[in-house]
Amino acid sequence: MTEHTWFIYLVRTAAGHLYTGISTDVERRFKEHTAGKGAKYLRGKGPLSLVFKQAVGERAAALKLESTIKKMSKYEKEAMLRGSSEISK
């Protein structure tokens, strides 16, 4: 993947909540989240685990997919995680 490839990722909190985000470097971004320097939503909710990562391509496509996933119920997100290693763009 090139440095301009965007990824969608999901992080699970200690309470089982799922956070959806996008990044060009998921590993770096996840380290920021675990250090409490990422999204405010995840601060103090560790330990965190990265449960999903998928290359999407361009930023616009990643933003659109992120919006779609954020509108899904937790049940739908869990089913997506169980049923497929990739989600449709």
Image (cartoon, helix red, strand yellow):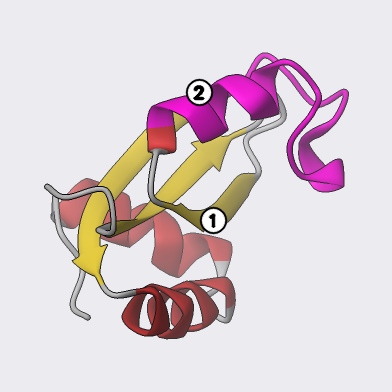
Q: Quadrant of the C terminus?
A: bottom left
Image location (x, y in percent) of residue 12: 56, 35
Identified by mark 1, the residue type is Gly
How many other residues sit within 10 Å of disc 2, few (<14), some (14-19) or many (≥20)? some
Residue 89 position (above or below residue 37): below
62 vs 13, left or right, is: left
Secondary structure under badge 2? strand
Determine the image quadrant of residue 34.
Answer: top right
Image location (x, y in percent) of residue 18: 58, 47
Which residue is located at x 16 percent, y 50 percent?
Answer: 2
Q: How many marks?
A: 2
Determine the image quadrant of residue 57.
Answer: bottom left
Mark 1 highlights which residue? 21
Secondary structure under badge 1? strand
Which residue is located at x 28 percent, y 75 percent?
Answer: 58
Mark 2 highlights which residue? 49
